[in-house]
Image (spheres, rainbow, N blue to C red):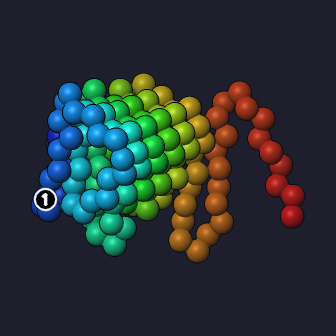
């Protein structure tokens, strides 16, 4: 799952948070956002479009991600909400829950949280991490 060969960046405008940059505050964007630096705040992409965020090696986000397409090879400390797709590279570290409709995980990626499958018109399904006791459904 090499991001370079499998996926092309959106043809829309690309916004870059360069290595060494640190942004404090929420980011609302349309198109593509690449993060090589540090962001402390929530990242929100337009849901109706093809917005995508890439947290690259060395990049980190402390806050929620609410973007249709999310690629992570850096670090995220917060929940991820992707209405279309999430891809985790081998170097990805996520401390939070991942809400997804399509998920791809490379061997070596670390997730300290739950995977929550989101499907339109369907009930939510939660995958409990190994070592935790699953709660029984009552209803």
Can residue 38 be seen in this snapshot?
A: yes
Q: Position of residue 31 (x, y in %)?
A: 21, 60
- In the displayed structure, 57 sits above or below 102; it is above
Of the pair 30 and 3, the residue shown nearer to us: 30
Residue that mark 1 sits on: 13
Residue 131 appears at what percent x and percent y? 71, 27
- Front residue (pair 136, 14): 14
- Rendered image quadrant of residue 72: top left
Residue 109, percent from left and from top: 43, 29
The residue tagged with tag 1: helix, strand or loop?
loop
Percent x, y of residue 114 = 60, 42
Q: Residue at x 58, y 74 (%)?
A: 121
Residue 106 appears in which quarter of the rendering? top left
The foreground one among 117 and 72 is: 72
Residue at the far right: name it: 138
Viewed as shown, does residue 106 lie left or right of 21? right
Identity of the residue drawn at 50% across and 41% down: 78
């Amino acid at each position: 799952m090499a991001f370079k060969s499998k996926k092309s960046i959106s043809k829309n405008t690309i916004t870059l948070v360069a290595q060494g940059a640190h942004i404090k505050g929420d980011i609302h964007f349309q198109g593509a956002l690449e993060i090589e630096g540090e962001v402390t705040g929530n990242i929100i992409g337009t849901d109706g479009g093809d917005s995508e965020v890439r947290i690259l090696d060395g990049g980190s986000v402390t806050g929620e991600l609410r973007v249709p397409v999310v690629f992570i090879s850096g670090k995220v400390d917060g929940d991820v909400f992707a209405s279309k797709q999430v891809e985790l590279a081998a170097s990805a570290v996520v401390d939070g829950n991942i809400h997804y409709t399509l998920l791809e995980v490379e061997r070596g990626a670390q997730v300290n949280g739950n995977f929550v499958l989101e499907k339109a018109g369907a009930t939510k399904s939660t995958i409990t991490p190994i070592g935790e006791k699953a709660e029984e459904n009552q209803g």
